[in-house]
Amino acid sequence: MPVIAVVDYDMGNLHSVCKGLEKAGATPKVTFSPKELAEADAIVLPGVGSFDPAMQNLRARGLEQPIKEVIASGKPFLGICLGLQILFESSAEGTQPGLGIVRGKVKRFLPEPEIAIPHMGWNQLELTQPKSTLWEHLPSEPWVYFVHSYYVEPTEPQIRAATVTHGNQTVTAAIAHNNLMAVQFHPEKSSNIGLQILSNFVAQVREKVFA
């Protein structure tokens, strides 16, 4: 089974992500060791919480450069929730610079009458890259689970793999470009659809590892 490093930087419960990866057929390894990141077959960067503490924790553990290096090397990489947002250059939530791996910013939902912020609960994806390997074996508008007040806005819209509509705002829900994939929703909390997405990622890792 492919070994997938789950980055530990004290931003959220990693247990459910690891359980999801195990069910999807991988061996998860929770780590903040740059050596173990380099040795793993793929990387998952989860995260819940706020942008600035996430970036401060990553930098304090010396993980900024190793993460950039594993992505540049072509290793399969999946960001989840906050793990999507910190790939970007900056966030309206804080003042720390992000990793800057993806050009663009993180913005806050605009308030609307009778629309809750955070955007929390089940919502449907519109797949803007329907042929992405992440979406294999999924229905055309799958339901997934969200918890967020901020969303990413990439400078290059073609990297959007899915959008979601909350109130009158349609925002990026996932990005995919080569080996780099990241989602705003929580696949590990998204029942069978989420497990299929994780399984698709693991299958992509396995094909690369055992090709």
Image (spheres, helix red, strand yellow):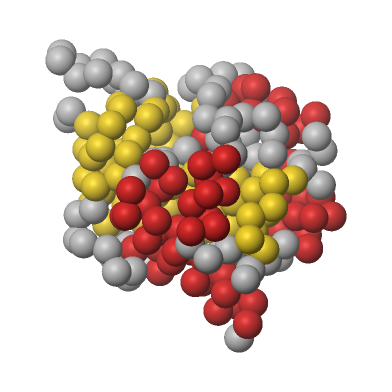
Q: Is residue 75 visible?
A: no
Give the camera-side residue of 124 and 95.
Answer: 124
Q: Residue at x 45, y 64 (%)?
A: 199
Q: Position of residue 21 (x, y in %)?
A: 53, 56
Residue 160 vs 207, above or below: the answer is: above
Q: Quadrant of the C terminus?
A: bottom right
Residue farthest along the bottom direction in this orientation: 211
Residue 153 in the image: above or below residue 5: above
Q: Quadrant of the N terminus?
A: bottom right
- Residue 48 horizontal side relative to residue 64, left or right: left
Q: Is residue 172 above or below residue 2?
A: above
Q: Residue at x 64, y 55 (%)?
A: 28
Nearer to the camera, 208 or 160? 208
**Which picture quadrant has residue 170?**
top left
Q: Does 211 sit left or right of 141 as displayed?
A: right
The image shows residue 66 at horizontal and vertical percentages of 77, 50
Instruction: Give the side of residue 166 with respect to residue 145, left or right.
Output: left
Q: Residue at (82%, 38%) from the top-left corner?
A: 62
Location of residue 56 by image quarter: top right
Q: Position of residue 46 (x, y in %)?
A: 56, 41
Residue 134 is situated, as x and y percent measured from the top left of the image, at: 40, 63
**Identity of the residue drawn at 55% across and 79% down:** 207
